[in-house]
Image (spheres, rainbow, N blue to C red):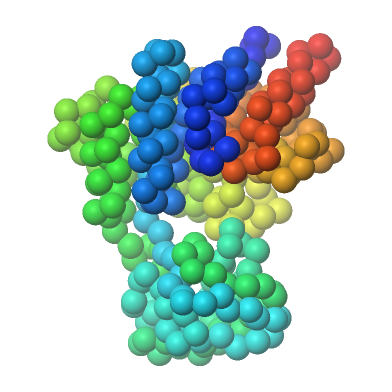
Amino acid sequence: MLNRLSYICTVGPSMANNSILEEMYKLGMDTIRFNMSYNHPKLYDLITIAKEFKQKHSDVALLIDSAGPEIRVLIDEPLEFSANDLITIGKDFKLTISDLALLNIGDLIYLKDGDYILEVIEKGTDTAICKALTAGVIKNNFKVYNESLYNALPFLSEYDEECIKLACENPVDYFAVSFVRNADNILQVKDMLKKYGREDIKIIAKIETPRSLANLDEIIDVSDEIMIARGDLSTLTPRANIAHYQKYICQKCQEKNKPIMLATGVLASMEQKEEPTIAEILDLYNIVLDGITKIVFTSETSVSIDPLDVLSTANKIFDTVKKKN
């Protein structure tokens, strides 16, 4: 049994000063993560704060997490809808990919981490009429998931290359590659890091798509570490299978002696509440038993009411695991 968990904490408004970072460091934070999917000016201010903190604590690593190939909603005003409503993509809202002819009748389109689902019932070149299978509110910049549209995207965008360049220009230790499809994707990123003179940056492959699961062995072989990105994985695959996939990926990484980390929903309720749910306590307990040594906190630390309490709670759960096993 390891002595403690390693916490990778995503920066955000809740972590925007050195005093908070100092307290989180004492509680076990050893990596600061920058989520490049949300590109905004304040992110670069946070990078500056983290760099200054790293100068004081050289053992703290910096991790840039790429956006990867993605599709997002473009809409001026939120669109509220009910189940069975008809929504026309290309009219009611647009997407950052224009070739809707790639869609097929019966295709499912997932929004907001899979909480909202649309089914394509009619399509054209520039529009697709969908029936809502759930109720909700579509907002600008929501991620959109559909395998046909996603597979048409190039793996590395201009923005991804900007993120790689940003990593190379700063004291970044890790680069997390989003929506990995195969080993060649990792090699592309390695070539880019070499181009900018930072071959020393370690690569984390995020397993979050059916194709990454299908090519898991080759991806593990060419990556430095593996991240189970449960949020997107549970959107792009049947959600009921997520526990199986988590254990399957763990087993593969252990067979190949590859470090593994887990992201999404570990203590998600603590973004708004002081206490975790019973299910979250059980989840973290089992995560440790599965041999996962690194936990990636996202909204739990970036926008939570108390990021210090998140780490303190995780430590208490881990201490229970140590005592009982």
Residue occupying the point 55% across, 52% down: 232
Q: Is residue 106 left or right of residue 133?
A: left
Residue occupying the point 65% across, 47% down: 242
> Do we see residue 226 in this rendering?
no
The quarter of the rendered structure image containing the C terminus is: top right
* Relative vertical location of residue 74 with respect to residue 81 in this rendering, above or below: above
Residue occupying the point 43% across, 13% down: 57
The quarter of the rendered structure image containing the N terminus is: top right
* Relative vertical location of residue 113 with respect to residue 183 in this rendering, above or below: below
* Relative vertical location of residue 168 with respect to residue 117 in this rendering, above or below: above
Task: Examine the image and state in which quarter residue 185 appears.
Answer: top left
- Image location (x, y in percent) of residue 241: 67, 50
- Image location (x, y in percent) of residue 38: 44, 51
> Do we see residue 324 in this rendering?
yes
Task: Examine the image and state in which quarter residue 151 appears.
Answer: bottom left
- Image location (x, y in percent) of residue 289: 71, 24
Residue occupying the point 68% across, 40% down: 305
